[in-house]
Image: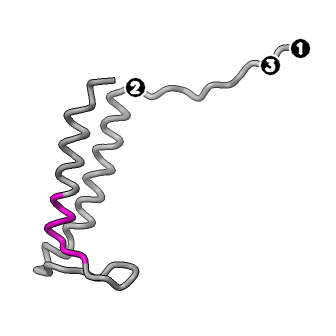
Amino acid sequence: MSRKRATPPKRSRLKEFLLYFVLLLVMLGLVARPFAKGAIFYQSYWGGAVFVPFVLLIAAVLAAIVVINWNRK
């Protein structure tokens, strides 16, 4: 009796890239909502103040890293 390992279906690289990119854009949109309303800070879940432009900068750097490293695998 042989046991075959069921491997999950592999996503294409383009689909994987688009999935991560769309998720990053959704997160970027959620972070930018307070900034669009004129607030520079918003209160985090734990009660601390979050500087919105800094978070947007981090998200932009992450998006650039994803785009640059996408085709290197």
Q: Residue 32: image x %, image y %? A: 19, 67
The single residue placed furthest to the left in the displayed view is: 38
Dot label at residue 12: 2
Where residue 59 sits, quadrant-wise, is: bottom left
Where residue 21 sits, quadrant-wise, is: top left
| Residue marked by disc 1 | 1
Query: Where is 5 relative to 51, above or below?
Result: above
Q: Find out whether residue 31 is within the magenta segment.
A: no
The number of discs equals 3
Q: Would you say the magenta stretch is mainly helix, strand or loop? A: helix
User: In the image, is 59 to the left or to the right of 5?
Assistant: left
Q: Residues within 10 Å of mark 1 (few under 14, many from 20)?
A: few
The Cα–Cα distance between marks 3 and 1, rounded to whole angstroms, is 7 Å
The Cα–Cα distance between marks 3 and 2, rounded to whole angstroms, is 27 Å
Amino acid found under the numbered disc labelled 3: Arg
Amino acid found under the numbered disc labelled 2: Ser
The Cα–Cα distance between marks 2 and 1, rounded to whole angstroms, is 33 Å
The quarter of the image holding the C terminus is top left
SS for dot 2: loop
User: In the image, is 18 to the left or to the right of 2?
Assistant: left
Magenta stretch: give its range. Answer: 50-57
Tell me the residue at 39%/79% (across/down): 45
Q: Nearer the viewer, mark 3 or mark 2?
A: 3
Dot label at residue 22: none
| Residue marked by disc 3 | 3
Mark toward the start of the polypeptide (3 vs 2)? 3
Amino acid found under the numbered disc labelled 1: Met
Q: Residue 12: image x %, image y %? A: 40, 25
Tell me the residue at 33%/78% (across/down): 44
The quarter of the image holding the N terminus is top right
The single residue placed furthest to the right in the displayed view is: 1
Tell me the residue at 18%/71% (across/down): 52
